[in-house]
Image (cartoon, grey):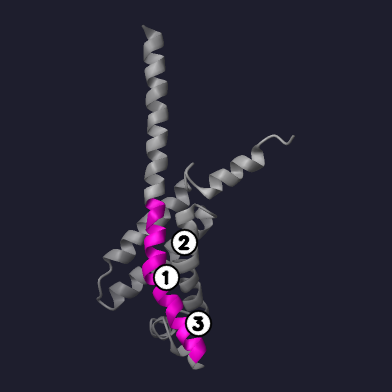
Amino acid sequence: MEANYSVSYTSISLWMKKQKDLGLLLLRGSGFLLALTFGVQKIGWYWSALHAGKSFSSIGLAPLIAKMGFPIPVVLAIWITFNESIGAFLIGCGFLTRILAASLALGMVGALYTSVQLREDWLRAALYSIIFSSLAFTGPGELSLDHLLKHKQSAPKS
């Protein structure tokens, strides 16, 4: 009778692991959503500015960042643009997930602070901050490029 409990426990454990990995994949999907909405928008700002010959300090988020009193507004605006476009896309793919998620979570804390100070809707920034902080702590799961690359590196060489 104990063998059945052992097999059941193993089956449940494997099922729960698969569920966890699926949950992490769904969380990482928010990276795709962020990249396809806000990321593309921010890249568009800089693309237009380059073609118009405008200074980066006068476009995109740089003026707002300066107004909020954050240091080096142009550098922060470019960092935020990278985070919300390329970084978010890579998180969706599960590549360099922990470091990019930590970076994006930090950026979202800044967005949350800014939204609260301007008395704007802060909920989206808070949710993204929670999602990306969670991914920074948990990692991407097995359904990711990080896991695939780690598995390939640890495979015995022939």
Residue 66: where, in percent of width, then height?
43, 84
- Depth order, front residue of 61/67: 61
The stretch in magenta equals: 27-51
Q: Amino acid at mark 1?
A: Gly
Q: CA distance from mark 1 to mark 3?
A: 16 Å
**Outermost residue, top direction?**
1
Q: Which residue is mark 1?
A: 39
Image quadrant of residue 96?
bottom right
The answer to whether residue 102 shows anywhere in this view is no
Task: Classify mark 1: residues with Cα within 10 Å, few (<14), some (14-19) or many (20+).
Answer: many
Q: Is residue 39 above or below residue 137?
A: below
In this rendering, would 109 be left or right of 152?
left
Residue 39 locus on image (x, y percent): 42, 70
Sequence-wise, the earlier of marks 1 and 3 is 1
Q: Is residue 84 above or below residue 4?
A: below
Category of crowding for the residue at label 3, using alpha-carbon neighbours closer than 10 angstroms: few (below 14), some (14–19), many (at least 20): many
* Magenta stretch: includes residue 126: no
Give the tally of numbered discs.
3
- Label 2 sits on residue: 89
Identify residue type, mark 2: Phe
Frontmost of labels 2 and 3 is 2
Q: Is residue 22 above or below residue 118?
A: above
Rendered image: mark on residue 74: 3
Residue at the bottom extreme, as displayed: 53
Residues at discs 1 and 2 in contact (Cβ within 8 Å):
yes
At x 37%, y 12%, the residue is: 4
Which secondary structure class fits the magenta region best? helix
- Distance, label 2 to label 3, CA atoms, is 22 Å
Rendering coords of residue 64 (x, y %)? 38, 83
